[in-house]
Image: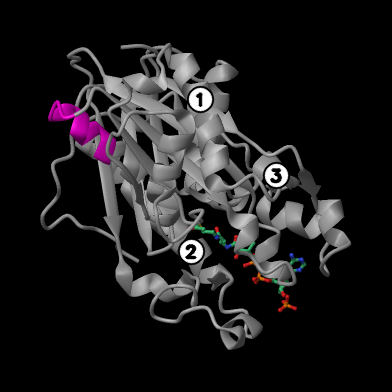
Amino acid sequence: MNLSNAKNPPLCRLPEVVIQGSGIYLPSKVLTNHDLEKMVNTTDEWITERTGIKERRIAGEKETPSEMGAMAAMMALQNAGLTAEDLDMIIVATTTPDTIFPSTACYIQHKIGARTIPSFDIQAACSGFIYGFILASHFIACRSARHILLIGAEKLSAIVDWEDRSTCVLFGDGAGAFIISLGENSPDQLSFDIGADGSQWQILYIPAGGSKLPLTAQNINHKLHFLHMVGKKVFRLAIDSMEQSLTRCIEKAGISAEHIACIIPHQANLRIIEALSERLGIPGEKFFVNVEKYGNTSSACIPIAFHEAVASQRIKEGDIVLFVSFGAGITWGSVLFRYKAKA
Ligand code: ACO
C-alpha cells in the first residue's frame, strides 16, 4: 500500500537539537515464553519463531507509567548533568496513561519536582516517541524551550487480554526518557518524516474505555476494554509504512543508507525488522534489536533501545542514527540525526 503524504510534504529538516541524556526503567519481573506456556495454549518455539521474543517485563501494581516514566526521567537528568529545575517542558508519549486525565506528564512533573512548566501527553501509539521527538525539536528551534523531557512510558500488560494468545505474547512494560536540548549550529543533514492513515484505525484499537463506548459491566464482559488487533494486516502495514517512511527520511536528508551507522526500528516483531532490512537492501547488522528481551513496549521501545545502544557503544559520538516506527492509527515516523552526546 502506498502511504505517501508527498502532495504537501511538511518541512523536513530538524533543528539543531541534541539528546543531552537518556534513561530507562524496566520492571524487574520477567515473564518468559515458558511462563506463558503455563498461561495460554502456546509454546516457546512458536513465539520465538513468529516474533523473536523470548521474554518481556511486567510492571507491578505500583509501577504505573508515571512511576516508570519518572524513574527513567531521573536517570536521563542525571546523565544529562541537569536537574528537574532545569526543564522547560515535559512531553509524554503513552497509549496506557495512568488515567484518562490528568495527563501522565502532569503526574511526572509532580513526582520529579519540576517547576510549573507545560506538561502534556501525546497519543500516536507506538510512533508516539518519534512524534514527540519532532514536536520537542520544534519547540527548541523556536527558542520556546531549552531543555525538554520527552518520555515514552507504557504498561501494556494492563490492556492485553491474558487469555488471548495471539496478542498477550507480544507486549511488555517499561519506560525510556530523553533530555532534548538546544545544540550548536551544525551543518549535518537531519530530517524527519511523519504521517498517519486514519482509515486503518480498526486494525489495532481498544473499543471501550473512551467516551464513545464507556466502560460498563457488559463491555467488560465482552472484553472490549482490551487491545484488539488484526495481526496479519498490522504485520503487512508495519513493513510498508516503515519502509516508505524510512526511504522518504533518507531522501529528504540527501544521504544514502550506507551513511547510517545504526537504525533503531520499533521493536514489535523480529520478522518485521528482517523484512524491512531485506526490502531496503540494508544489512541486518545495521538494525539494533532488543525485542527478544522486552517484547513490544510501544512508545517506550525506541528510547529504551537507543539508551542500550549508546551504553553498549553500538552508537558512538558522530554516528548517523535513524529511528523508525509504526503504530496504531495507523501512524508512522522516522527521524535521522547525527548523534552528539552533549550540547
Ligand atoms: N501460540 C501458538 N499459536 C498461536 C499463537 C500463539 N501465541 N498466536 C496465534 N497462534 C496460531 C493462530 O491461532 C493460527 O492458528 P490456525 O492456523 O490454526 O488458525 C496460527 O498460529 C497462525 O496465526 P497467524 O495470526 O496467521 O500468525 P502470524 O504468522 O500472522 O503471526 C503475529 C501472528 C505474530 C501476531 C503477527 O501477525 C504479527 O506480529 N503481527 C504484527 C503485530 C504487531 O506488531 N502489533 C503491534 C503493532 S504496534 C502498536 O501500535 C501497538
Is residue 94 rendered to the left or right of residue 145? Answer: right
Q: How is the image coloured?
A: one colour
Look at the image and give the residue range highlighted in magenta.
135-144
Which structural element holds mark 2? Answer: helix
Q: Nearer the viewer, residue 194 or 99?
A: 99
Which residue is tagged 1? 74
Crowd tier of the residue under label 3, counting other residues whose Cα lies within 10 Å: few below 14, some 14–19, many 20 or above: many
Image quadrant of ligand 1 equals bottom right
Tell me which corner region of the image, top left, top right, bottom left or bottom right, holds residue 3.
bottom left
Q: Amino acid at mark 1?
A: Met
Residue at 17% from the left image edge and 54% from the top image edge: 6
Q: Amino acid at mark 3?
A: Arg
Give the quadrant of the N terminus.
bottom left
Q: CA distance from mark 1 to mark 2?
A: 37 Å
Label at residue 236: 2
Label at residue 338: none
User: Upstream in the sequence, badge 1 or badge 2?
Assistant: 1
Residue at 57% from the left image edge and 84% from the top image edge: 219
Which residue is tagged 3? 57
Instruction: Report the number of discs.
Output: 3
Is residue 82 rendered to the left or right of residue 219? Answer: left
